[in-house]
Image (cartoon, rainbow, N blue to C red):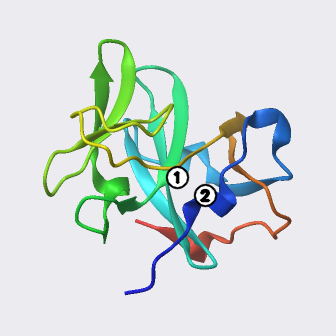
Amino acid sequence: MQKIDYSNYKPLDEQNVDNWIKVGTAEEFPEDGGLCFKHRELQIAVFNFTNRNEWFACQNLCPHKMQMILSRGMIGSQQGEPKVACPFHKKTFSLKTGECLNGDECRITTFPVKEIDGEVYVGLMEHIEDITPQDLVV
């Protein structure tokens, strides 16, 4: 299995983003749920957290079992912290920091997200083209 280095794609903060990738329209994403898009070898989960009126993005790869599944995880809050739970083993990760909230040392990479006029963008540190609708995985 190829090891994917998500750290190469993680901006330090929103101000350091080189390129905002359009990943779709807000109406294409389920309420309080996620979709996955693929960019090169990366799969990135994007969540429409409507209960909080916020958007989040993270790697789709669960670091515990090394499966591409987080976009299908359950989202919620833990003491005010937005989180996603892996649907296979229920490990939970902060959607803000990537920290494992179960106390384990594994973590996930998070990406900045913004919605402008109904279009959803994910920030990366490299120049790439917009994602096409065929890149969205339902």
How many callouts does the rendering have? 2
| Three-letter code for the amino acid on which mark 2 is drawn | Ser
Q: Residue lying farthest front?
A: 105
What residue lies at 84% left-to-right and 34% top-to-bottom? 15
What residue lies at 56% left-to-right and 62% top-to-bottom? 6
Q: Nearer the viewer, residue 23 or 98?
A: 98
In the rendered image, the quadrant that contains the N terminus is: bottom left
Q: Nearer the viewer, residue 71 or 115?
A: 71
Position of 65 with respect to 8 (left or right) is: left
Position of 121 with respect to 87 (left or right) is: right
In the rendered image, the quadrant that contains the C terminus is: bottom left
Q: Which residue is mark 1?
A: 28
Q: Which mark is residue 7?
A: 2
Q: Nearer the viewer, residue 97 or 115?
A: 97
Q: CA distance from mark 2 to mark 1?
A: 28 Å
Callout 2 crowding tier (Cα within 10 Å): few <14, some 14–19, many ≥20: few
What residue lies at 46% left-to-right and 43% top-to-bottom? 47
Please tell me whether residue 20 is drawn above or below residue 93 in the rendered image: below
